[in-house]
């Protein structure tokens, strides 16, 4: 009976995909009083592209003046402080240095400086090699020119996405996990979305934010104008010694064709180096390679020699979308305009959006909400409800669980882990994205079994229930509290 009642509901909007873009589309639709359901095929939000990228909030000098990409980037960067304050997400506005290594790359840096000045990027400065070295003494002496952008920032993308999803939930968003859309048809003036568990969702509009699979989701209803070629990006995370890492985000403009590596000081004191890219299938596991990690480590230490004394923490990989037009597969699509498509009857697809997708996530959510309102025939006044205050679960004084350290490396308490479960974590990886547990030198070897035990206890796991860790590993729990690998 409950399933029948659910299928009788007609939603204003169904958002497919609970990544960063899906969460911000859902948030801004909810802020416009659009009755919205979020459909996510995994067990949690932000488990795909959102959890593995360079995590940079760009300043806006890379894009041509007047483009949608430029305008959204500039606006999003200006409003970052207010957005993070409302969502209570930590960020680091550390600024960036784009450095070059010879006449050819110097010319590119100067071009980006002129473009940034035309775009109105605040505080932009062109620096000599000496000025660059004064700002970052640890950089290689081979640097010939630098472009300083103080507005560049970084944060953890998954934290931003989770916070947006939680805020949307406070405004009425409903979410269905473990729900994969298998068919889409039009019936009686609305869309019928068939699911993997034989239920149907009915909605007046659809927002397709399915990440790497966005073109395949579009294909369930209409031939996509944009296709995705998946690419695997590899990263290395360092634990720097004191003074052994840059204080700014470092971009490289190399003399050779192609982009050099990027070094990003993270909000929790690590140093992220990326990326090495290679082709991948859309369903490829995000696995690193020995050659990719070795190259990243070598190039990082060449760029910043002081990293030679740093401890390598971990390597990881993620899939990224490379969009192309089927009639012109060799043409690179780098603007946002062609990547947001509409069928004309209420299906809006965001296909192949990558850099600066993190930067523009909230602005893209607002833009998409406006298009949904137009499809629904509602007036778009530009008014959005306020983002609600984050719900509080913590009770430090009353709850002794907040005095029990579970993750030694990052000093995460049992209380914080239990809070993460209340906020929606159902896997070890979900706890990690909400608390930072398992991100230290031991990479969770000490805390993961304990977190799994807390998850099992909170989720009332029966004897023999299998609990996923979010990365394909499993633990089988017994009522006596023991565990064994499966």
Image (cartoon, rainbow, N blue to C red):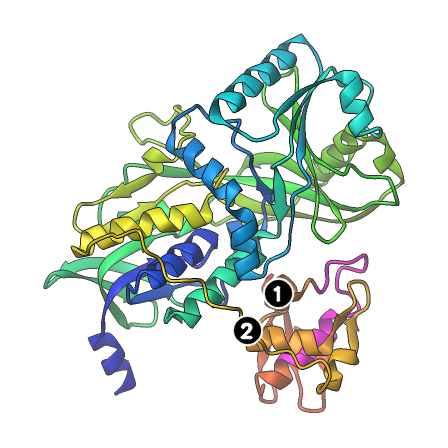
The quarter holding residue 35 reads bottom left
Q: Is residue 124 above or below residue 162?
A: above
**Element assignment for label 2:** loop
The relative height of residue 36 versus residue 66 in the rendered view (above or below) is below
Specify the farthest residue to the left. 188
Whole-number angstrom distance, CA of label 1 to CA of label 2:
9 Å
Q: Residue at x 76, y 23 (%)?
A: 132
Q: Point out the stretch of residues depicted in magenta.
A: 437-455
Who's the residue at 29% across and 27% down the image? 327
Quarter holding the N terminus is: bottom left
Q: Which residue is mark 2?
A: 423
Residue 54 horizontal/vertical position (percent): 61, 42
* Residue nearer the viewer, 409 or 160: 160
Q: Earlier in the sequence, mark 1 or mark 2?
A: 2
In which quarter of the view is residue 2 placed?
A: bottom left
The residue beneath circle 1 is 434
* Mark 1: secondary structure: helix
Q: Position of residue 176 (x, y in %)?
A: 39, 70
Pointer 1 and pointer 2: residues touching (CB < 8 Å)? yes
For image coordinates 51% across by 53% down, the residue present is: 83
């Amino acid at each position: 009976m409950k399933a029948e009642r659910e299928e009788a509901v007609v939603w204003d909007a169904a958002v497919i995909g609970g990544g960063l873009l899906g969460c911000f589309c859902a948030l801004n639709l909810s802020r416009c009083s659009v009755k919205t359901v979020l459909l996510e095929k995994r067990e949690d939000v932000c488990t795909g592209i959102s959890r593995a990228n360079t995590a940079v909030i760009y300043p806006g000098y890379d894009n041509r003046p007047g483009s949608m990409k430029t305008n959204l980037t500039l606006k999003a960067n200006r409003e970052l402080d207010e957005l993070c304050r409302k969502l209570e997400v930590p960020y680091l506005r550390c600024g960036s240095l784009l450095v070059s290594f010879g006449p050819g790359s110097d010319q590119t840096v100067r071009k980006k400086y002129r473009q940034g000045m035309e775009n109105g990027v605040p505080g932009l400065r062109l620096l000599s090699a000496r000025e660059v070295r004064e700002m970052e003494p640890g950089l290689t002496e081979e640097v010939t020119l630098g472009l300083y952008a103080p507005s560049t920032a970084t944060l953890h993308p998954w934290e931003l996405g989770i916070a947006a999803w939680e805020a949307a939930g406070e405004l009425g968003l409903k979410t269905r996990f473990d729900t994969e859309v298998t068919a889409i048809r039009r019936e009686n003036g609305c869309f019928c979305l068939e699911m993997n568990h034989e239920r149907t969702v009915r909605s007046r509009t659809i927002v397709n934010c399915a990440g790497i699979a966005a073109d395949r989701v579009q294909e369930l209803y209409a031939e996509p104008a944009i296709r995705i070629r998946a690419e695997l990006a590899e990263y290395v995370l360092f634990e720097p010694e004191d003074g052994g890492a840059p204080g700014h985000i470092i971009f490289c403009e190399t003399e050779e064709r192609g982009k050099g590596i990027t070094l990003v000081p993270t909000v929790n004191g690590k140093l992220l180096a990326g990326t090495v890219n290679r082709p991948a299938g859309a369903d490829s596991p995000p696995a690193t390679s020995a050659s990719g990690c070795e190259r990243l480590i070598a190039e990082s230490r060449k760029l910043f020699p002081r990293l030679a004394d740093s401890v390598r923490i971990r390597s990881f990989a993620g899939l990224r979308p490379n969009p192309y037009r089927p009639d012109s597969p060799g043409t690179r699509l780098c603007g946002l305009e062609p990547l947001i498509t509409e069928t004309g009857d209420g299906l809006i697809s965001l296909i192949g959006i990558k850099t600066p997708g993190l930067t523009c996530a909230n602005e893209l959510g607002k833009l998409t909400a406006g298009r949904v309102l137009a499809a629904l025939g509602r007036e778009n006044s530009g008014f959005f409800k306020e983002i609600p205050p984050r719900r509080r679960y913590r009770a430090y004084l009353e709850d002794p669980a907040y005095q029990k350290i579970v993750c030694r490396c990052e000093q995460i308490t049992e209380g914080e882990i239990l809070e993460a479960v209340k906020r929606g974590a159902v896997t070890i990886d979900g706890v990690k994205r909400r608390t930072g547990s398992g991100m230290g030198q031991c990479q969770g070897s000490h805390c993961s079994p304990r977190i799994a035990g807390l998850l099992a206890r909170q989720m009332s796991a029966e004897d023999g229930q299998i609990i996923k860790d979010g990365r394909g590993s499993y633990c089988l729990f017994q009522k006596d509290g023991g565990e064994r690998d499966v």
